[in-house]
Amino acid sequence: MNRSSVFFRYILRQSSQKRTGALSMRCICSKVANHQVQADLPSHSKVTLPALSPTMETGTISSWQKKEGDKVSEGDLLAEIETDKATVGFESSEEGYLAKICVPEGTKEVPLGKVVCIIVNNKEDVAAFKDYVPSPEDDVKIGGSGAPAAVKQPEPAAPAPPAPLPPTAVSPPTAAPTVAPPAASGVRVFATPFAKTLASEKGIDLKQVRGSGPEGQIRAADLAGISPGAPAATVAAPVGLPGQLFIDIPLNNIRQVIAKRLTLSKQTIPHYYLTVDVKVDNILRVRKDLNEILSKSGVKLSVNDFIIKASALACKKVPQANSSWQDTFIRQYNSVDVNVAVATDNGLITPIVFGADAKGLADIATDVASLAAKAREGKLKPQEFQGGTFTISNLGMFGIKQFAAVINPPQSCILAVGGADKRLVVSEDSDSGFRTATVMTVTLSCDHRVVDGAVGAQWLAEFRKLLEQPETMLL
């Protein structure tokens, strides 16, 4: 099954109360009141959406792999959820029947703790949930630790006064606000959970509302000023027009996370940059010799493998560069886990070469090839790209001579590698006083809270020595 996003499976399990309700790595889908009896309904389980990654706030129901009424066996895939990191598959851990899908396929921005489906033990109980709609009280609040919080019964809310219609501003003649035509019976309405809740409370028919979100999704703001039973005059979703000079592209979850983290990095981390030129003639010679030796094993070393190894060894020599800022202290790591930036169709991802300082070049080459292939095929597991202590971004293969990269928080350094080209360099051993050398430019971005300028310069000196004298990697 080919997917462009990262896919892995989690098993639905309920955490033991003895563990203070905390979700373990295998406890992905929360079950609320395993056998509830509610308003003459048969015994059933309510499956809620938990935090599937440390930074997840909402999720998207990419697809349901089971239909209402289908039998669910242990290990069956129920649904796929797109998080801020990946597309996560849900597997069932017990026997039962899928009685009700509470959040339809394609729904975006599903909040954590939202009831997504109902599972019953007996097939004859499925019909009882045909018209079932979960109430807001059924949802579970997810705390900062990822554990389900206690559900607080909301107090009855006083009827809100009718919202006054906003004043109409005088403007040049424009197209009148469009009213969505009534949707045909049985047509699925795409709306955020909050919008559905507001519509239910106000008695608004969502079929009469035209959403302003991606793919016409209805948001809470689209319901402002709409009276119950009245057709909604809302802002129409962007439509491509002849001669239009631009097109709006909806953001996927991965792109939103990249934007959020890099904005956070530039706003909170005091970056500074150090640049040096590195002669790589010796590396190219050693690489050629080693590749001849490794030709029968199917392993082929790249210059980037040497860069990873040299970076890891330089981090061992200058451990301040292998550290992270933790607000009240600096954490220095014993192992050097190097993130390698890989471009994919969904955005940038940084799989990790663990323990690069202790690995040989052949092992590093094998790891990088495997991780890069998984990244492009969308098959990386979370533990293969979450974490790391030092990052390398190499744009040399694209003809970039030099650039400065944005630090990957909470790390303190990232190395930007440019392309190598032939240059004239001073040579005391040459009769002409100069010679031609293959030179590569690298730039180290540092967090000044952790790495002082002199320390960053020391790291680059160690890195350049290791690359220009590759035999020192054996010491």
Image (tube, grey):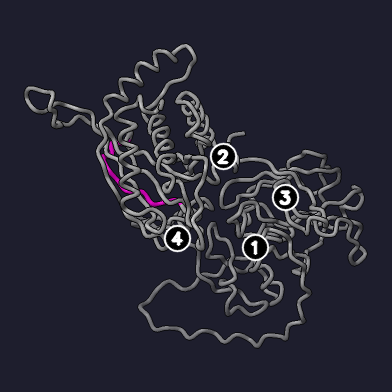
Q: Are marks 1 and 4 in contact (CB under 8 Å)?
A: no
Label tally: 4
Residue extent of the magenta highlight: 398-408
Of label 1 and label 2, which has the lower sequence position?
1
Label 1 element class: loop
Circle 4 packing at 10 Å, graded few (<14), some (14-19), many (20+), is few
Location of residue 206 in the rendering, given as x and y in whole percent from the top left corner: 65, 68
Relative to residue 10, is residue 445 drawn left or right? left
Asked whether 402 falls inside the magenta stretch, the response is yes
Please name the amino acid that badge 1 sits on.
Answer: Gly
**CA gap, disc 1 to disc 3?**
14 Å
**CA gap, disc 4 to disc 2?**
23 Å
Q: 185 or 307: which is nearer to us?
A: 307
Of label 4 and label 2, which has the lower sequence position?
4
Checking the image for residue 144, the label placed there is 1
Please name the amino acid that badge 2 sits on.
Answer: Glu
Residue at image mark 2? 384
Q: Residue at x 54, y 85 (%)?
A: 165
**CA gap, disc 1 to disc 2?**
23 Å
In the rendered image, which quarter contains the N terminus?
top right
